[in-house]
Image (cartoon, rainbow, N blue to C red):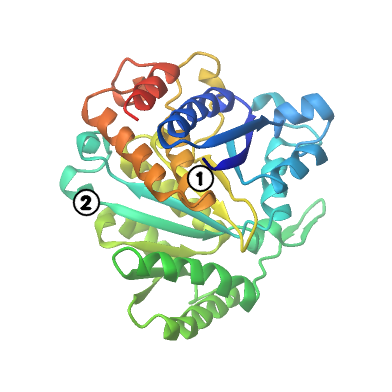
Amino acid sequence: MSRHSLVLLPGDGVGPEVTHAARLVLQAVARRFGHDLAFAEHPIGGAAIDATGEPLPEATLQACVASDAVLLGAVGGPKWDGGAKRPEQGLLAIRKSMGLFANLRPAKIDDPLIDRSPLKAEAVRGVDILIVRELTGGVYFGERTRTATTASDLCAYSVEEIERVARIAFDAARGRRGKLTSVDKANVLETSRLWRETVVRLHRDYPDVTLEHQLVDSMAMKLITSPSSFDVVLTENMFGDILSDEASVLAGSIGLLGSASLGASGPGLFEPIHGSAPDIAGQDRANPIGAIRSAAMLLRYGLKLKAEAEAVEAAVGAAIAAGELTGDLGGALGTQAMAERIAARL
């Protein structure tokens, strides 16, 4: 029996519901495979502002750093709009404080749900993309200025920042279908020129991986017109934020997909890509699959439990194939019932 310490950050809106659902599935994994999973909950985001006045309390951060892995629900909501402190500040701060520089977002089509995609079936059949987004640099973390009539946000990258996330993308491509698409805006931006030069140089260490470059505007178009042509996609922070949200729509529901945020060492942070959805919070209507797939990524990347991760993914796939679906996918199951069906299949 192996013992692992997990921190749960339920957050806001539907976050507590989907986090509870993922915990239920992780507990089923522990029973099946004989692991001892210890869970501890801590506040983040709006819930933390209400409780402590800070979107990321020091106690939450310290618990996360001391854990083996962290599972987050969602942060944000209109309740905290206009306040001096915003829930999203907690998410940015925890990524930075934990050194989580690489965000992995899979976008894979479940065959039984192919008709739920807004694109034609022939366009999305076989789509299996992994977007690797740099997470702690670029314009989101650059110096900001504001006057009554002007504003600026500095976008800055170093070779070291580019290299470390590019290596994760190259390694991922090597373990998948061997193709990496690096996205930039090298025809305009100096940061993108440095990005492309660094990726090209690093490619010498990965001769078995095919490398191509796309400008971000062209990439946005091709994600819609030919998404199945991509394998691993590497890009900087803001471009990755936008493109990964675009790719998530291909699957038919934003509630289906999970993500992993990783650093060079220490625990990772795993979370569904959807937001807090305050309009359906507390109604047992949120799709928990994104959180459950995030839990599978936690098992794979955070705890190095590959067989357990594959078991969760297989259980999710079997439930979908059996037509066990939540309302966003045309089904009748609630959040809790969906999680129970998946857990039962373990």
Q: Quadrant of residue 332?
A: top left
Q: Amino acid at mark 2?
A: Gly
Q: Nearer the viewer, residue 232 or 252?
A: 232
> To which residue does mark 2 refer?
126
The image shows residue 14 at horizontal and vertical percentages of 55, 24
Visible residue check, residue 149: yes
The image shows residue 277 at horizontal and vertical percentages of 53, 26
**At 54% from the left edge and 67% from the top edge, which residue is drawn?**
165
Q: Is residue 238 above or below residue 49?
A: below
Dot 2: few (<14), some (14–19), or many (≥20) neighbours within 10 Å?
some
Q: Quadrant of residue 335?
A: top left
> Quadrant location of the C terminus?
top left
Visible residue check, residue 215: no
Disc nearer the start of the sequence (2/1)? 2
Dot 1: few (<14), some (14–19), or many (≥20) neighbours within 10 Å?
many
Disc 1 is placed on an element classified as helix
The image shows residue 315 at horizontal and vertical percentages of 32, 33
Residue 186: which disc? none
Disc 2 is placed on an element classified as loop
Q: Is residue 162 above or below residue 267?
A: below
Q: Nearer the viewer, mark 2 or mark 1?
A: 1
> To which residue does mark 1 refer?
298
Q: Quadrant of residue 136?
A: bottom right
In the shown orientation, is residue 282 left or right of residue 266?
A: left
User: Residue at the front extreme?
Assistant: 1
The image shows residue 96 at horizontal and vertical percentages of 70, 55
Q: Is residue 261 above or below residue 315?
A: below
